[in-house]
Image: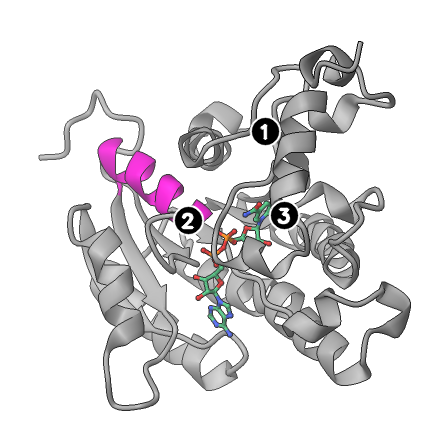
Amino acid sequence: MPDQSKLFAGKKGVIMGVANERSLASGVASFLSAQGAELAFSHLPDKDGRDRNEKRVRQVTDGLNTKLVAPCDVSSNDDIVGFFNKVGEAFGSIDFFVHSVAFAPVEDIRCQTVAASRAGFLTAMDISVYSFIATARAASELMTNGGSMVTMTYFGAEKVLAGYNMMGVCKAALEASVRYIAHDLGPKNIRVNALSAGPVKTLAASAVGDFSSMLGMNAAIAPLGRNVTNDDVGRSTAMLLSDWASSVTGETLHVDCGYNIMGSPGHALERLGKK
Ligand SMILES: NC(=O)c1ccc[n+]([C@@H]2O[C@H](COP(=O)([O-])OP(=O)(O)OC[C@H]3O[C@@H](n4cnc5c(N)ncnc54)[C@H](O)[C@@H]3O)[C@@H](O)[C@H]2O)c1
């Protein structure tokens, strides 16, 4: 019998985007598992006959309340259908879905946006934006009793953040997709939101130029005077997925220690000893 004192007792869902223990999705997974959720995870397919990707993901998921770990490259329609079929077989229906996936060729993110290649742009939009449309559709088919979805975005969608470049364009499209999909799925009682996380040092973040200075600047400017942790992201994602947010849909929630509200350096000059 599920422990009814837990927020996700009896709830089942899918998390895409665990690469290793530093992934934002890993913080989400730990929190949801501790709160009683049963989880299914995807990993990048291992094409060379070895199982490196699967092993890395299992290092995170083995200690959790995991029912399924299966491959899915989100740039393949067949992979998405195959993965969600397995989820359907394991769970029947699901209650929540977390999409924490993005990719851009490093040469197209390390250059000015105006210099990005057509091929790089299409790849980045495919994996970072269309993948949410396609997986949200597949997940919604399993949400027969309503449900909730969250995708991960970044403030670079709204304002120019040097170094984020073309990925800012992708995140703007992702946030717009969230609003349109929230409209589409609202009648099925499925909520769709984006969580705009402050910077965290992960594998994907290493593609962004000068990420360490970005971390220092964010902590200095943010009203709370620090950067977010995976635990912060896990808790707030769980809040959006849970009934605590039962009337919230189509939103972008900033989980960034307040950085996005600032229009000046705020406390940064004192904090950096320049005042
Ligand atoms: N780290 C940050 O500072 C930060 C801040 C805000 C938003 N985000 C967003 O959070 C999400 C997760 O990123 P992260 O920082 O945890 O990094 P991460 O590298 O740990 O996660 C990225 C995930 O995308 C997956 N992925 C890439 N291409 C894929 C494909 N073709 N098919 C399936 N999966 C694929 C990777 O396997 C990995 O699991 C991304 O959308 C990212 O833009 C990150």
Say whether disc 1 or disc 2 marks the residue closer to the N-terminus. Answer: 2
Mark seen at residue 25: 2
Residue 211 marker:
3
Task: Give the mark nearest the N terminus, 1 or 3.
Answer: 3
Q: Main secondary structure of the magenta part?
A: helix
Residue closest to the far right = 114
Spot occupied by residue 5 in the image (x, y as percentages of width and height): 21, 20
From the Cβ of disc 3, is ligand 1 less than 8 Å away? yes
- For badge 2, the amino acid type reads Ala
Circle 3 residues within 10 Å: few <14, some 14–19, many ≥20: some
In the displayed structure, does residue 222 sit left or right of residue 275? left
SS at mark 3? helix
Picture layout, residue 131 above or below residue 93:
below
Q: CA distance from mark 1 to mark 2?
A: 24 Å
- The residue lying furthest to the front in this view is 274
**Label 2 C-beta lies within 8 Å of the nearest ligand 1 atom:** yes
What residue would you read off at disc 1?
247
Disc nearest the viewer among 3 and 2 = 3
The one of 73 and 269 positioned closer to us in this rendering: 269
Q: Residue at x 54, y 79 (%)?
A: 75
* Residue depicted at x 67% and y 78%: 123
Q: Which residues are magenta?
A: 23-37
